[in-house]
């Protein structure tokens, strides 16, 4: 018989309550606690050290253990490369399928089956996102287009009349793909300079005059409070489906599009921003551990200490759970083929 007074069960009472409210029997939590006690959970992020994905993963790791049955240690590993394809292939094909490994790929992963955003020709993909166990995302945050204060562009209208040099990591990343789509749909004149390892390198390049700006998660910009305070940048466009409350005067790319077909394409692409920092387990993880991890994630998202740390790195905690991410993936699959075909031809000409 399971001893319900064990330390692992009592210390995770919030997760146990969440499981009970979801209709799952208590033994699901207790079995997961038995497994996780004394183990280490690895969160592998496809972002480079010092970038937004790294910050989010480390903020989660700091507070996650107390919500997971058995209170395992939680560590973060960085595995940047190929716009997170390297990490996702590793998670899917080589990581342990026992519930001790989670991955945080770039959010373009949810569009990969439809658009081949990360792989371009699809040849580097060795995973099926529909078979992964999605845990959740702590935020829903679109990318924004910013220019450094020394750039001449003052508004979104200037992007159609002036060449704007933006830094990018590589084809497949949003900082390359979004300007590419904008040139095709909105008539902008972006020139992308690739080869930067991470967003911090692009920030430095802007300060040194190599580029004029780029697209980045808003949290990455909020992570540079001196730039925001001293008005060293201008945010000209946001790429979500609707305007963020904190950027109510900044137009969306869809608003700037010249016709309804282009607006539909922007809205389809913007669906991925609802999963800004997606977290998944590989396939075949025992169901009780997936359930317990989802419940632990839900509890973490309500943890005042985590929320405070998230605010420090510019993250407004607006979580979605694993089931919601699965629905978004299904909704993307249901987008009319002509819309996706137009995007595919832009991204992979």
Image: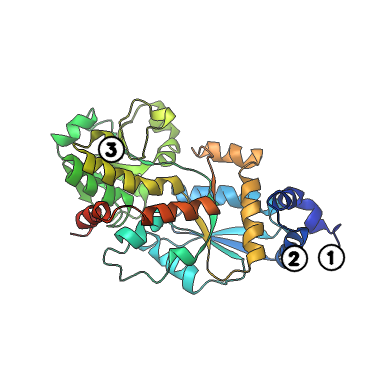
Q: Residues within 10 Å of mark 1 (few under 14, many from 20)?
A: few
Cα separation, mark 1 vs mark 3, equals 55 Å
- Residue that carries the numbered disc 2 in the rendered image: 31
Please, what secondary structure does the residue beneath circle 2 have? helix
Please, what secondary structure does the residue beneath circle 3 have? helix
Image location (x, y in percent) of residue 278: 48, 53
Q: Are marks 1 and 2 in contact (CB under 8 Å)?
A: yes
State the mark number for residue 254.
3
Image location (x, y in percent) of residue 276: 44, 47
Closer to us: 211 or 56:
56
Image location (x, y in percent) of residue 132: 50, 64
**Residue 50, visible in the rendered structure:** no
Instruction: Determine whether, in the image, residue 248 is placed left or right of residue 25.
Output: left
Q: Is residue 245 above or below residue 218?
A: above
Q: Residues within 10 Å of mark 3 (few under 14, many from 20)?
A: many
Cα separation, mark 3 vs mark 2, equals 48 Å
Please, what secondary structure does the residue beneath circle 1 have? loop
Mark 1 or mark 3: whose residue is earlier in sequence: 1
Say which residue appears at 31% left-offset and 64% top-offset. 119
* Quarter of the image with the C terminus in it: bottom left
Instruction: Determine whether, in the image, residue 83 is placed left or right of residue 181.
Output: right
Cα separation, mark 1 vs mark 2, equals 8 Å
Q: Are marks 1 and 3 in contact (CB under 8 Å)?
A: no
State the mark number for residue 2.
1
Image location (x, y in percent) of residue 58: 55, 51
Say which residue appears at 67% left-offset and 64% top-offset. 288
Mark 3 or mark 2: whose residue is earlier in sequence: 2
């Amino acid at each position: 018989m399971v001893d319900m007074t064990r330390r692992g069960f009592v210390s995770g009472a919030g997760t146990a309550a969440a499981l009970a409210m979801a209709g799952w029997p208590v033994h699901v939590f207790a079995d997961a606690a038995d497994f996780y006690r004394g183990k280490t959970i690895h969160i592998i992020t496809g972002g480079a050290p010092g970038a937004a994905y790294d910050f989010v993963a480390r903020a989660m790791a700091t507070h996650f253990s107390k919500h997971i049955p058995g209170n395992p240690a939680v560590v973060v590993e960085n595995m940047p490369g190929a716009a997170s394809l390297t990490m996702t292939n590793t998670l899917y094909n080589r990581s342990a399928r026992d519930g001790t490994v989670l991955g945080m790929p770039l959010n373009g992963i949810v569009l990969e089956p439809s658009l081949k955003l990360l792989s371009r020709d699809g040849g580097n993909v060795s995973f099926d996102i529909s078979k992964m166990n999605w845990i959740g995302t702590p935020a829903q945050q679109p990318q924004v287009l910013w220019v450094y204060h020394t750039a001449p562009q003052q508004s979104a209208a200037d992007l159609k009349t002036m060449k704007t040099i933006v830094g990018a990591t590589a084809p497949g990343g949003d900082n390359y793909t979004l300007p590419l789509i904008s040139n095709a749909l909105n008539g902008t004149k972006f020139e992308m300079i690739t080869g930067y390892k991470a967003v911090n390198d692009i920030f430095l390049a802007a300060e040194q005059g190599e580029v004029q700006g780029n697209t980045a998660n808003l949290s990455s910009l909020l992570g540079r409070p001196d730039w925001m305070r001293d008005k060293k940048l201008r945010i000209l466009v946001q790429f979500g489906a609707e305007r963020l409350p904190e950027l109510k005067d900044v137009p969306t790319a869809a608003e700037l599009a010249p016709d309804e077909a282009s607006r539909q394409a922007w809205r389809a692409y913007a669906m991925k921003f609802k999963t800004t920092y997606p977290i998944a387990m590989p396939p075949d993880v025992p169901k009780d551990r997936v359930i317990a991890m989802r419940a632990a994630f839900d509890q973490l998202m309500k943890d005042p200490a985590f929320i405070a740390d998230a605010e420090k790195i510019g993250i407004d905690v607006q979580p979605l759970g694993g089931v919601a991410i699965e629905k978004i993936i299904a909704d993307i699959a249901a987008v009319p083929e002509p819309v996706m075909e137009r995007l595919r031809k832009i991204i992979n000409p």
